[in-house]
Each structure stands twice: as C-alpha cells, then as structure tokens.
Image: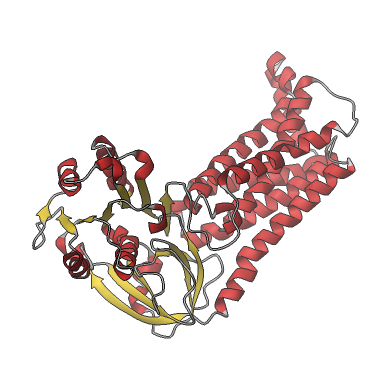
Amino acid sequence: MTEHRSRPGSAAATGLTLPVTAAVAAFVVLAWLPLLLALGAGEESGGWHEEAGIALGLVGLSLLLLQFAHSGRWDLVSGRSGIDVTMRFHRAAAILVLVMVLLHPVLFVLPLLLDDPARGLAQLHAMFTSPRMTAGRIAWIALVATVILALGRRLMPYQHWRLLHGLGALVAAGAGVWHAIEVGLYSAFLPLAVLWWAGLAGAGMLLAWAWGWKPWRAARAGWRIGAVTPLGPGYWELRLTGPTPPHFAAGQFFWLAFGRAAPWNENPFSLACAPGARDLRFVIREAGDRTRALGTLPAGLPVRLDGPHGVFTLERAGPGPLLLVAGGAGIAPILSVVHALDATDDARPVALLHAAPTPDHLVCRAEVMAIAERRGWRCRFLAEEGAPEGGMQGRPNREVLAELLRGGAAAEVTAMVCGPEPMTMAVIRDLEALGVPSGRIVYEQFDYA
C-alpha cells in the first residue's frame, strides 16, 4: 500500500470537518466520560489498587471504542489534520489501550503480587481463567492479537491485515462491553451502561459505513479505467473516466478499488492532474501485488473511489514563492500542483527538483520541463545512477537546494516535499538549515508496504 503522511494544518476540506482543537477536546472528554459517570454510581470504593484497575478498564474501553472514529477515513475527524496525523494518533492510542488492558487485571492483585509473587500469580491465573471472566478474556486476547498484527502488518498482504484488524477490533470492543456490564462494579449503573451500548453501536455502525455503505455508493458512481500506460521502469499512468469529477485540491489522493475487490482491499494513490480535469489521472509506482498487476487491468474495468483525502495541497502554500521537491513516485502530487499552477496562470516564482534512482525513473520529465520553460520556472533533475539529459548525477543536497532558492528570501518560500521518508527528512533538515521556516515546509511521505 501507499501510506501518506503530511504536516498538519488547514486542509482542503470537502465536507463537514472538526477543527483539530475541537477534535482533540472531544476525544479527551469522551475518553474520560466513563470515569465521570462512575462517580455518580454511588458504589462503595475498594482499595486504591482495585479503583486504579477499574479506572484503567473504564478509560481503556472508552479509548478502544473511540478508535473506530478515527480509523475509517472519516472527514469529520481527519479532514483538517490529515489521515496521516490521524493514523499516527490511532497507533499511539492503540499502544496506550494495550498497556491499560494489560495492567487492568494485574492491579487487582498487585499488593499480593508484591507481597507473595507466587500466590499473586496464582490468583491472577484463577481470575483470568474464571468462567465469569470469559468475556473479559476474549476481549483481552482479541485486543492483544489485533495490536500485535498491527505492529507486524508488513508481514502479510495489506488487505488481509486490514480485514483481520477490523474484525479483531470489533470482537475486542464487543467482548469488552459485555465484560464491563456483566462483572463491572460501576458499569451496571444505567448511564454508564447506556454509554457502553451506544459506543459499541457507534463502532459497529462506523465499520458498516466504511465497509458497506461507502463501497456500495462508490460502486454506483460509474468510474472506470480509461487507460493504463507505461511511463518507465515500474511506473504506470492510470486514467479513470466517469461522471463529473469530484471536487479536490491539487496534491490530494484517492483510495482506489478495482473491479469486485473487497471493501478492505483498496490502495491510496495521489492525483497527478489539476482540479477540474475531465479524467482523473494517477502516476503509480509498482510496489506490491496490486500495483504490479496494473498493466493487466483492462479498459472499462469498474473502479471505486474513496476521497479526496490529504492535506498536502497547494491551498496551504500561501501567495509566496514555491519550491517543489519530488522523490521517485512523489512526482504524482507534485504534478497535480504543477498543472494547477499552470491552469490558473499563477504568477508566483516556482522552482522544482525531481530526484530518482536512474534517469529512466524520472517519469513525466518532458511534461514538467515544457510547463517550466513556458512559465520561466527553474527545474533540476537528479539521478543517483547516471546524469539525465540536462540534469545531474547525485542525490538532493543542501547545495542543490541553495541554488534553487537563490535570488529570493528563504524565509518567504513555501516548500512542498514529497518522496521516500529518508529523502524527505534529509531535504527538510537542509531547507531549515538554509532558512526556510519549518512552518512553511509542507511534506508528504510515501511508505510502501
């Protein structure tokens, strides 16, 4: 798959979205809401270790249910921050939930564990294997397995992992709610019980929306493959034809599913065309089974679109000079920006750098050069193995970037950087050293698994 990462900021939102601060505030309030409701239950307090164990269980289950809200490419949650930021938060929250769930049963026997480890472990085992704890045991095992699979997701095909991930999370959430209501000291309190059932229903509805309603609606939109054309070694141009193109901003991407692919069998690809283009165009590098089979896909094959997504957009660049830096397949969203600037007759100064392993991998070079020459932009092309015609051999470095920034104030430049993570991070460090403010560096990284 292709994983997109970009700096948070104002996105080119296409629907109702929450401001980042509002989304964070809502998350914090909902995560702690079970504890606030538990205070009104009027139950007798146990020892501090029992209360701590209960608190971890309540907050951990709340966080688990909230995971569904920021894992389904829901614009309301990720439209402002970007899916990349949302997914990083999702992974961090999953680790936190796992720690809470692992510690939840341990705290109930903690004093005994510290005083007599053998007896403490025996009591922990008895508690864990008790028939009364069946639901909790299922939730515990399902959550641990789901997180472990997530940490090792590159060891299996993405679509298999995504299916197991969604089902595992749903089992953990359902069993967790069952456990909380069946044996929880506070969860029998009606307001808290209602909260758990509402949260579980919401999680199920979000999964049904992501894997049911959205794919069904996308399949009815009528998008089909117009053409698949080779661009260079391992690179393809994909054109989709269909109804009036959806609104998108230059630099955004769509998740695509070909033919009768399952709802969890999708791949994200960046657009390489300007907003308003009649057909949707993508430039794609072979990186897995799906992308290696692009050349075999026939014209007319139905395609499902989910998007647009992403905050790597021209709208975030402001009015000043632009520096566009692409590495390998990172040229796709940069092409979208290039064509948008050309289509709108944007007069701002632009410099562009495209780097690739070999000259043959500098795809769409003639296309970029034609626009750059007509508009008076500065362009540099780099290849690690051999110098391309009119270009240089080597990798992006501070000297090349300084030459492209020459003649303008670095503090006024907005840099848009897209490519492999090592290159992107190195370019960002060099740009900051050259005086480009970190807040004016928009970046997107491609991580193929």
Q: Which quadrant of the view contains residue 216?
A: bottom right
Relative depth, front residue between 129 and 422 = 422
Residue 171 visible in image: yes
Asked whether, in this view, residue 47 is left or right of residue 348, the answer is right
**Percent from the top left, x then y, of residue 292?**
34, 69
User: Vertical placement of 223 versus 13: above or below?
Assistant: below
Residue positioned 71% across, 47% down in the render = 138
Q: What residue is drawn where x is 29% and y is 77%?
A: 229
Q: Residue furthest top?
A: 115
The quarter of the image holding the N terminus is bottom left
Q: Residue furthest bottom?
A: 300
Tell me: residue 38, above or below residue 383. Answer: above
Vertical order, 378 against 108 (above or below): below
Total residue callouts: 0
Q: Is residue 131 visible?
A: no
Image: 218 above or below 170: below
- Taking 303 as reference, is 439 left or right? left
Q: By what rule are the colours in the image chosen?
A: secondary structure
Q: Say which quarter of the image contains residue 25.
A: top right
Question: Which residue is found at the position 88% from the left and 41% from the top?
Answer: 188
In the foreground, 110 or 356: 356
| Quarter occupied by residue 33 | top right
Residue 129, how many percent across, how many down? Answer: 75, 38
Q: Position of residue 354 (x, y in %)?
A: 22, 57
Give x and y (percent) for residue 50. Answer: 78, 25
Drawn side of residue 144 relative to residue 190, left or right: left
- Quick one: 195 or 139, which is closer to the camera? 195
Q: 14 left or right of 354?
A: right
Locate the C terminus by quadrant.
Answer: bottom left
